Image (tube, rainbow, N blue to C red):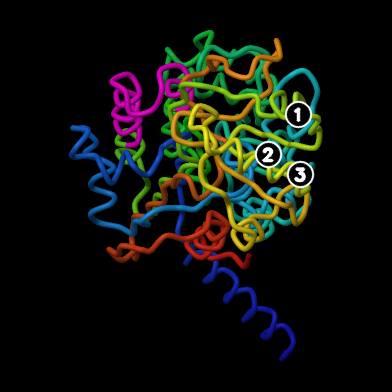
Amino acid sequence: MKRPMRILLCCCVAIATLAAKQPLVVVSVDGLDNRYLINADQMGLKIPNLRRLMREGQVSSGIIGVVPTITWPSHTTMITGVDPLKHGILANWRPPGEKYLDYSQIKVPTLIGAAHAAGLTIATINWPVTVDAPVDWNIPEYFSKRRGGAQDRRTVESKAKPADLFEQIAAAYPSFPQEWMDDRNRTQAAMYLLQHEKPGLFLIHLADLDAEEHDNAPYTRESKAIVERSDELIGQILSVLPAGSALAVVSDHGFERVNTTVDLASLAKQQGITSLIQGGGIVVAPDERAAEFLRQTAKDSRYGIGREIGKEELAKFPSSLPPNPAAAFEPADGFMFSPSPKGEVFSHPEEIGNHGHWPMRYRAVFILWGKSIPQETLPEFSMKEIAGKLARVIGVSF
């Protein structure tokens, strides 16, 4: 008799623990630089929902990103708690090909995996690297064509789980199956799942702001309008949030205006230096000769060489860059480093807004709101800490 009673007791404890978990919705607004929040008054932003979440919940003074500060590596860091060099998603996926596309390519445990193992139901919408993820409802970031932040619906739908999910959502929202899936459609899908399925963990990625900032630069009239539209969509999600749920708003990176791209590697080759490595928001000199070239060139402001990054700071951000370089610099305001197809030293950027800068250049966003979440202003912290904070809300060990 004792053994069955012990088993029954264990089962009761497990059920009680499961019932105590707090459902969590995570909304990532791609490219939402923290300056949109801390300077909202100066910008005249109408963001009542974000203001409410900040006023009533936890809000960080800023999130320090990882290398590289781009969408897919950063989103994967938010659900793994480790640097891209460790989790293996080192760049954004772009068709053709399947590199950095499938969930199985993530090399470390994830928040999704922990929630799945704990028996929680999970939904993901447009979250990077979630094709064939162990979730119950999935509309992954996957496309053949893009138009701004929108993706062609038929390609996205081909990877949806369950296979008839789009049909289910369209029955509730007849305008859902339009040709291009944008943040409005993603929010419709989120509202449907919150109303009908109530997942224990829900990851949602809104992408329209990032696209607008690339096209029209951050902090412009157009980009601020998309911030306000994102706030409206968050309000719609809040309106159907199941009782007792928590809501997190995060972002993957900041944003900078870019007026000029400089091909420092091309300039260095004119002086016989071929070791220079440039990558958008950083230029690295593996040896002393290249380092001296950069320090001398930095004296001329035309070349857009900004702050030299110290060795201790470099060591805090593991990356695929050469270890222990002789020197590394980030660009000055308005500049990025990039090879020119024509070998020109100076060129006009294809996108007047961009990210990919060194993580200390800007800050991303973290807000956490809901039942049992105290009102609190948190200091700056690393993006690698987000996964642990989310895991504690849903009550899983991670």
Q: Amino acid at mark 1?
A: Gln
Q: Is residue 4 visible?
A: yes
Q: CB of mark 2 within 8 Å of CB of mark 3?
A: yes
Vertical placement of residue 225 versus 387, above or below: above
Front one among 326 and 92: 326
Highlighted range, magenta: 210-234
Point 53% across, 8% down: residue: 179
Locate residue 343 relative to residue 27 in the image: left or right: right
The residue labelled by disc 2 is 293
Residue at 53% from the left image edge and 65% from the top image edge: 395
Contact between marks 1 and 2 (CB within 8 A): the answer is yes
Q: Position of residue 45 (x, y in %)?
A: 22, 33
Q: Earlier in the sequence, mark 1 or mark 2?
A: 1
Which quarter of the image is occupied by the N terminus? bottom right
Residue 223 x/y as whole percent? 35, 24
Labels in figure, total: 3
User: Distance of mark 1 from mark 3, alpha carbons?
Assistant: 11 Å
User: Please, what secondary structure does the residue beneath circle 3 have?
Assistant: helix
Residue marked by disc 3: 289
Q: Is residue 255 left or right of residue 338?
A: left
Q: Is residue 119 visible?
A: no
